Amino acid sequence: MTTTFDRQSFRAALGTFTTGVTIVTTRAGDGSAVGITANSFNSVSLEPPLVLWSLAKNARSLAAFESAGQWNVHVLSAQQEALSGRFARQGEDKFAGIELDEGVGSAPLLRDCTARFQCRTASSYDGGDHVIFVGEVLAYDRSEHPPLVFQGGQYALAARKPRDEIRLGAAPSPDCCYTEDLLGYLLGRAHYQMLHRLRRLLDTDALDERTFFILSVLSIRDRLTLAQIDGFIAYTGMRASEAAIGALVARGLVAPELADGQVRYLLTAEGRAASLRHIALAKAVEAEMTDKLGAGDAMALKLLLKRLVASSDPGAPDLWAAN
Amino acid sequence: MTTTFDRQSFRAALGTFTTGVTIVTTRAGDGSAVGITANSFNSVSLEPPLVLWSLAKNARSLAAFESAGQWNVHVLSAQQEALSGRFARQGEDKFAGIELDEGVGSAPLLRDCTARFQCRTASSYDGGDHVIFVGEVLAYDRSEHPPLVFQGGQYALAARKPRDEIRLGAAPSPDCCYTEDLLGYLLGRAHYQMLHRLRRLLDTDALDERTFFILSVLSIRDRLTLAQIDGFIAYTGMRASEAAIGALVARGLVAPELADGQVRYLLTAEGRAASLRHIALAKAVEAEMTDKLGAGDAMALKLLLKRLVASSDPGAPDLWAAN
């Protein structure tokens, strides 16, 4: 007797097990390239080097994989989400416009993956409505591209945990209400520490944070009224006052322009040069942090911050919208 | 002929494929509980419901798994990292002090997991230096605990990507140097937006950010000199001046205390009450954001922020250190 479960609920339970995403390719008897997205990949054995994955018995590509005897598993990178979607769908020419590498066999070898395993079928086993392919790895390679992750039916990135717990300070006493684990504290401290080096540069330009934000807004969108500038920096809690913009004008970094009876502001050449120095430093600090965290973790952090910003947006105007 | 690879390099390539972490348990012939950490788990078939995992042929527990015919797979939650380590090591009584649930069979059923699959062996296949166990799922359940992730030999958390790309603004023109993808911008915007509601509460108390930081420091450590307070808030770029602390004293939120010829500051009852209101709001905002992001993603964000803070720390004194 076989157990039957509600498919959707059973799939959801299985989906809690996180996986990477692979594309497995082979060549059909007529020489055409065949490929399918699969997350059922896993390692099996080191000696001999074996991996496995499973394919639905009703998959169009089953015959090709059964007859070919040679196939390549590509562990996809975080940049290859679109490729994953393409190889998960039916009907289109999946390989159109894709450049391939030469492999040890004839199976298509995709580029820019996190890792690749070129295999020959060692065994294929029955797995209910799937066939389990066990392959001997003939050749493999890997890159530094951070891998794509799949969890709960969604793509994801991994935020790696260091071996030792990260302690920013001593453990707070239990009766202390603020802890270093508070999201607001962590965001503030991370933000201010990232600003630390920028602030020293601003000091040499005799600028403060508020004037820095005004310059930044004007470097993205020119010819704004004071009210518009104020609207764009309002999320910081700072205001674009007459005094603040006046100081920038006096410093020769910003120039007023009178048009249609309205005063609009734009950067001077000197203002643009100052802004470019700030951007260069911000990018250098980011590069340093990406180096320390790792590229994949930096991507994950930015993804999560974007989601937080989108979730907490009180209705800030779109600075990058077309004029 | 069998290919032989450098074990370490081959393992590293295999390790780029992200997995969840499971503990698989069974009961030996003598009734003793057996369990092992495995990340070689994967789903195989929906009808019949089959899953698989593989076990090294030289594992001590092999005989128990081969003879038992019934075993449970536990998909571990992010909170169960220590349990994972415990079941990955040999020699200790892995089940000591662990409470078990009643399952459909005799195999130990662990608690507080992300998902559990109770299986009977459907087939076992040769997999080189491992045995591949294919199990029919007899029963399963799942919880809302976010799952633990393993990637590149490290534990990790998943940062899930929404189906649609997150656009905070229109795509910046290519010649625009600031983009919404800049880490510094994202951190600043996230921080200021999270502060938004706190700032409104501060307004009603006639407090600004600087006096808020001073109050917060004093809520964690009492009886500090002005210089000490200044050291603790220095990472924000704001200074604890005589004027700022004077304003708090005048408002009756902070009181000076003269001891050993030094003035030290501490919160008054009113100051503590104000601080508790701020903390309650910060926690409410965090709860709301955790709800919007999901518990696992919020954990991943905090983990990454801690790593960023630790990586960018210019040497801030430890606010939570023992006096």
Image (cartoon, coloured by chain):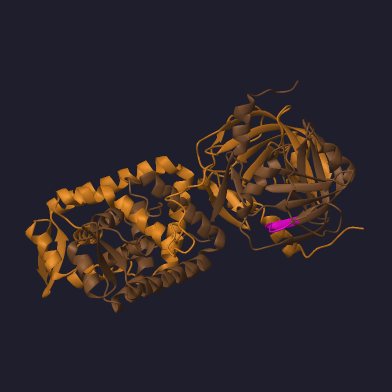
Chain colours: A brown, B orange
Q: Quadrant of residue A311?
A: top left
Q: Which residue occupies the extreme right position in the image?
A: B1
Question: Could one spot residue A221 in this view of the protein?
Answer: yes
Count of numbered labels shown in the rendering: 0
Q: Is residue A114 magenta?
A: yes
- Relative to A160, is A181 on the left or the right? left
Q: Quadrant of residue A237?
A: bottom left
- Relative to B235, is B254 on the left or the right? left
**Front residue (pair B307, B99):** B307
**Front residue (pair B285, B322):** B285
Is residue A250 shown above or below B96? below
**Front residue (pair B164, B260):** B164
Give residue B252's position: percent from left, percent from top: 8, 56
Magenta region:
A111-116
The N terminus of chain A lies in which quarter of the figure? Answer: top right
Image point (73%, 27%), residue name: B47
Give residue A229's position: percent from left, percent from top: 28, 58
Is residue B315 shown above or below B198? below
Is residue B41 shown above or below A218? above
Q: Quadrant of residue A140?
A: bottom right
**Front residue (pair A255, B201):** A255
Q: Label the magenta part by its dominant secondary structure.
A: loop
Is residue B195 shown above or below B291? below
Q: Which residue occupies the extreme front position in the image?
A: A260
Give residue A34's position: percent from left, percent from top: 80, 44
Image point (70%, 43%), residue name: A87
Question: Could one spot residue B60 in this view of the protein?
Answer: no
Give residue B137's position: percent from left, percent from top: 69, 30
Q: Which residue occupies the extreme top position in the image?
A: A1
